[in-house]
Image: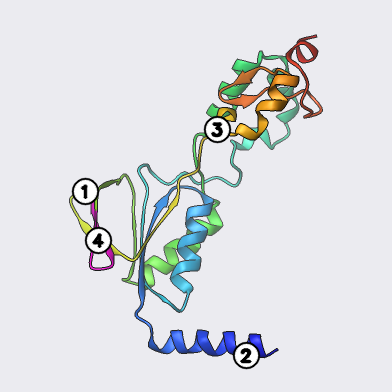
Protein backbone atom coordinates (compact mmCIF):
# COMPACT_ATOMS: atom_id res chain seq x y z
CA UNK A 1 0.00 0.00 0.00
CA UNK A 2 2.82 2.39 0.86
CA UNK A 3 4.43 1.72 -2.52
CA UNK A 4 1.13 2.45 -4.29
CA UNK A 5 0.67 5.71 -2.37
CA UNK A 6 4.25 6.73 -3.13
CA UNK A 7 3.80 5.93 -6.83
CA UNK A 8 0.53 7.87 -7.00
CA UNK A 9 2.15 10.86 -5.27
CA UNK A 10 5.02 10.83 -7.77
CA UNK A 11 2.60 10.66 -10.70
CA UNK A 12 0.61 13.64 -9.36
CA UNK A 13 3.84 15.58 -8.91
CA UNK A 14 4.84 14.83 -12.51
CA UNK A 15 1.38 15.82 -13.72
CA UNK A 16 1.70 19.23 -12.05
CA UNK A 17 5.37 20.03 -12.61
CA UNK A 18 6.88 18.20 -15.58
CA UNK A 19 7.20 19.67 -19.06
CA UNK A 20 4.70 18.31 -21.54
CA UNK A 21 6.17 15.80 -23.95
CA UNK A 22 5.84 15.92 -27.71
CA UNK A 23 5.40 12.65 -29.59
CA UNK A 24 5.88 11.76 -33.27
CA UNK A 25 4.16 8.51 -34.23
CA UNK A 26 4.87 6.73 -37.52
CA UNK A 27 2.55 4.03 -38.81
CA UNK A 28 -0.62 3.35 -40.73
CA UNK A 29 -2.51 0.57 -38.99
CA UNK A 30 -4.66 -0.02 -35.94
CA UNK A 31 -1.72 -0.07 -33.52
CA UNK A 32 -0.47 3.34 -34.62
CA UNK A 33 -3.91 4.94 -34.20
CA UNK A 34 -4.36 3.35 -30.77
CA UNK A 35 -1.00 4.80 -29.76
CA UNK A 36 -1.97 8.24 -31.06
CA UNK A 37 -5.19 8.28 -29.05
CA UNK A 38 -3.64 6.93 -25.85
CA UNK A 39 -0.64 9.25 -26.01
CA UNK A 40 -2.76 12.32 -26.77
CA UNK A 41 -5.04 11.62 -23.80
CA UNK A 42 -2.11 11.04 -21.42
CA UNK A 43 -1.52 13.78 -18.85
CA UNK A 44 2.15 14.09 -19.77
CA UNK A 45 1.55 14.64 -23.49
CA UNK A 46 1.68 18.14 -24.95
CA UNK A 47 1.21 17.27 -28.63
CA UNK A 48 1.16 14.41 -31.12
CA UNK A 49 2.13 14.35 -34.79
CA UNK A 50 0.98 11.23 -36.63
CA UNK A 51 2.39 10.46 -40.09
CA UNK A 52 2.04 7.65 -42.59
CA UNK A 53 3.48 7.19 -46.05
CA UNK A 54 0.19 6.14 -47.69
CA UNK A 55 -3.52 6.95 -47.48
CA UNK A 56 -5.57 5.62 -44.57
CA UNK A 57 -6.95 2.16 -45.38
CA UNK A 58 -10.24 1.72 -43.53
CA UNK A 59 -11.37 -1.86 -42.92
CA UNK A 60 -13.05 -3.78 -40.14
CA UNK A 61 -10.56 -6.63 -40.51
CA UNK A 62 -6.93 -6.96 -41.58
CA UNK A 63 -8.11 -8.76 -44.70
CA UNK A 64 -10.78 -7.89 -47.26
CA UNK A 65 -14.38 -8.42 -46.15
CA UNK A 66 -14.84 -11.26 -48.62
CA UNK A 67 -12.58 -13.45 -46.47
CA UNK A 68 -14.95 -12.98 -43.52
CA UNK A 69 -18.27 -13.14 -45.40
CA UNK A 70 -20.53 -15.92 -46.71
CA UNK A 71 -18.18 -16.72 -49.60
CA UNK A 72 -15.17 -17.35 -47.38
CA UNK A 73 -15.62 -21.13 -47.80
CA UNK A 74 -14.85 -20.92 -51.53
CA UNK A 75 -11.92 -18.57 -50.90
CA UNK A 76 -10.44 -20.89 -48.27
CA UNK A 77 -10.92 -23.92 -50.51
CA UNK A 78 -9.05 -22.18 -53.32
CA UNK A 79 -6.41 -20.99 -50.86
CA UNK A 80 -5.73 -24.48 -49.53
CA UNK A 81 -5.41 -25.85 -53.07
CA UNK A 82 -2.55 -23.42 -53.85
CA UNK A 83 1.14 -24.15 -53.59
CA UNK A 84 2.81 -22.65 -50.52
CA UNK A 85 4.46 -19.81 -52.44
CA UNK A 86 1.12 -18.85 -53.98
CA UNK A 87 -0.54 -18.93 -50.56
CA UNK A 88 2.04 -16.48 -49.21
CA UNK A 89 1.41 -14.11 -52.12
CA UNK A 90 -2.36 -14.45 -51.69
CA UNK A 91 -2.12 -13.52 -48.00
CA UNK A 92 0.03 -10.51 -48.81
CA UNK A 93 -2.46 -9.29 -51.42
CA UNK A 94 -5.41 -9.79 -49.07
CA UNK A 95 -3.83 -7.76 -46.27
CA UNK A 96 -2.52 -4.82 -48.32
CA UNK A 97 -0.58 -3.44 -45.38
CA UNK A 98 -1.90 -1.82 -42.22
CA UNK A 99 -5.58 -0.95 -41.89
CA UNK A 100 -7.72 1.00 -39.43
CA UNK A 101 -11.22 0.09 -38.21
CA UNK A 102 -13.68 2.85 -39.26
CA UNK A 103 -14.90 3.41 -35.67
CA UNK A 104 -11.36 4.02 -34.44
CA UNK A 105 -10.65 6.36 -37.34
CA UNK A 106 -13.74 8.43 -36.47
CA UNK A 107 -12.44 8.84 -32.91
CA UNK A 108 -9.09 9.99 -34.31
CA UNK A 109 -10.84 12.50 -36.58
CA UNK A 110 -12.91 13.89 -33.70
CA UNK A 111 -9.79 14.45 -31.62
CA UNK A 112 -7.96 16.13 -34.51
CA UNK A 113 -10.88 18.44 -35.29
CA UNK A 114 -11.11 19.65 -31.68
CA UNK A 115 -7.40 19.93 -30.91
CA UNK A 116 -4.76 21.92 -32.76
CA UNK A 117 -1.97 20.02 -30.99
CA UNK A 118 -2.90 16.77 -32.73
CA UNK A 119 -1.73 16.69 -36.36
CA UNK A 120 -2.28 13.79 -38.75
CA UNK A 121 -0.53 13.63 -42.13
CA UNK A 122 -0.85 11.19 -45.01
CA UNK A 123 1.69 10.38 -47.75
CA UNK A 124 4.53 11.76 -45.65
CA UNK A 125 7.81 10.20 -44.55
CA UNK A 126 10.72 11.22 -42.35
CA UNK A 127 13.51 12.77 -44.41
CA UNK A 128 15.97 13.72 -41.67
CA UNK A 129 16.36 13.50 -37.90
CA UNK A 130 18.74 15.46 -35.67
CA UNK A 131 19.12 15.31 -31.89
CA UNK A 132 19.34 18.85 -30.51
CA UNK A 133 18.89 19.98 -26.89
CA UNK A 134 17.14 16.83 -25.67
CA UNK A 135 14.70 16.71 -28.58
CA UNK A 136 14.44 15.14 -32.01
CA UNK A 137 14.36 17.76 -34.76
CA UNK A 138 12.56 16.03 -37.61
CA UNK A 139 12.28 17.11 -41.25
CA UNK A 140 9.41 15.52 -43.15
CA UNK A 141 9.16 14.80 -46.87
CA UNK A 142 6.54 17.54 -47.32
CA UNK A 143 9.11 20.12 -46.24
CA UNK A 144 7.69 20.76 -42.78
CA UNK A 145 9.59 20.26 -39.53
CA UNK A 146 8.58 19.17 -36.05
CA UNK A 147 10.22 18.60 -32.68
CA UNK A 148 9.60 15.55 -30.53
CA UNK A 149 10.78 14.09 -27.27
CA UNK A 150 9.77 10.63 -28.49
CA UNK A 151 9.46 8.93 -31.89
CA UNK A 152 7.27 5.84 -31.78
CA UNK A 153 7.43 3.46 -34.75
CA UNK A 154 4.29 1.39 -35.27
CA UNK A 155 5.32 0.28 -38.73
CA UNK A 156 5.13 -3.48 -38.30
CA UNK A 157 8.03 -5.83 -38.90
CA UNK A 158 9.22 -8.67 -41.08
CA UNK A 159 9.42 -11.97 -39.24
CA UNK A 160 12.22 -13.94 -40.85
CA UNK A 161 13.19 -17.25 -39.34
CA UNK A 162 16.90 -16.75 -40.09
CA UNK A 163 16.91 -13.95 -37.49
CA UNK A 164 16.14 -16.38 -34.65
CA UNK A 165 19.29 -18.43 -33.84
CA UNK A 166 17.41 -20.27 -31.09
CA UNK A 167 15.59 -22.23 -33.84
CA UNK A 168 18.78 -23.42 -35.58
CA UNK A 169 19.01 -26.73 -33.72
CA UNK A 170 15.34 -27.46 -34.43
CA UNK A 171 15.87 -26.72 -38.11
CA UNK A 172 18.83 -29.10 -38.18
CA UNK A 173 16.79 -31.89 -36.55
CA UNK A 174 13.62 -31.24 -38.52
CA UNK A 175 14.45 -29.41 -41.77
CA UNK A 176 11.51 -27.38 -42.99
CA UNK A 177 10.69 -25.38 -46.09
CA UNK A 178 10.90 -21.61 -45.66
CA UNK A 179 8.44 -19.45 -47.61
CA UNK A 180 8.93 -15.68 -47.56
CA UNK A 181 11.07 -16.04 -44.46
CA UNK A 182 8.56 -18.11 -42.50
CA UNK A 183 8.47 -21.86 -41.80
CA UNK A 184 5.93 -23.85 -43.83
CA UNK A 185 3.96 -25.47 -41.00
CA UNK A 186 1.66 -28.44 -41.45
CA UNK A 187 -2.12 -28.06 -41.67
CA UNK A 188 -2.45 -28.51 -37.89
CA UNK A 189 0.22 -25.76 -37.44
CA UNK A 190 2.84 -28.18 -36.15
CA UNK A 191 6.50 -28.08 -37.13
CA UNK A 192 7.12 -31.07 -39.37
CA UNK A 193 9.91 -31.93 -41.75
CA UNK A 194 9.55 -30.86 -45.37
CA UNK A 195 9.09 -34.48 -46.40
CA UNK A 196 6.10 -34.89 -44.07
CA UNK A 197 4.43 -31.71 -45.29
CA UNK A 198 4.84 -32.58 -48.97
CA UNK A 199 3.48 -36.10 -48.62
Give the crowd class for mark 4: few <14, some 14-19, many >=20 residues within 10 Å: some
Q: Which mark is residue 163?
A: 3
Between the C-alphas of marks 4 and 3, the distance is: 34 Å
Q: Earlier in the sequence, mark 3 or mark 2?
A: 2
- The reply to whether residue 18 is visible in this rendering is yes
Viewer-nearest of discs 1 and 2: 2
In the image, the segment drawn in magenta is: 130-140
Residue 179, numbered label? none
Does the image show residue 71? no
Residue that badge 4 annotates: 146
Total residue callouts: 4
Q: Secondary structure at mark 3?
A: helix
* In the image, residue 50 lies in the stretch drawn in magenta: no
Q: Secondary structure at mark 4?
A: strand
Tell me the residue that label 1 is attached to: 142
Residue drawn where x is 49% and y is 37% of the image: 97
Q: Earlier in the sequence, mark 1 or mark 3?
A: 1
Which circle marks residue 5 in the picture? 2
Q: Is residue 40 above or below residue 18?
A: above
Horizontal arrangement in the rendering, residue 178 relative to residue 150 (left or right)? right
Badge 2 vs badge 4, beta-carbon distance below 8 Å: no
Amino acid sequence: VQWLLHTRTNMEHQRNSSEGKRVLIVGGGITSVQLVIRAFKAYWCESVVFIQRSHHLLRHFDVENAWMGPKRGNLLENFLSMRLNDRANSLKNARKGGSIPPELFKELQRLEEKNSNLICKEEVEISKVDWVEDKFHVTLSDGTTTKAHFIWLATGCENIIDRYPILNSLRETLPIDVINGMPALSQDLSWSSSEAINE
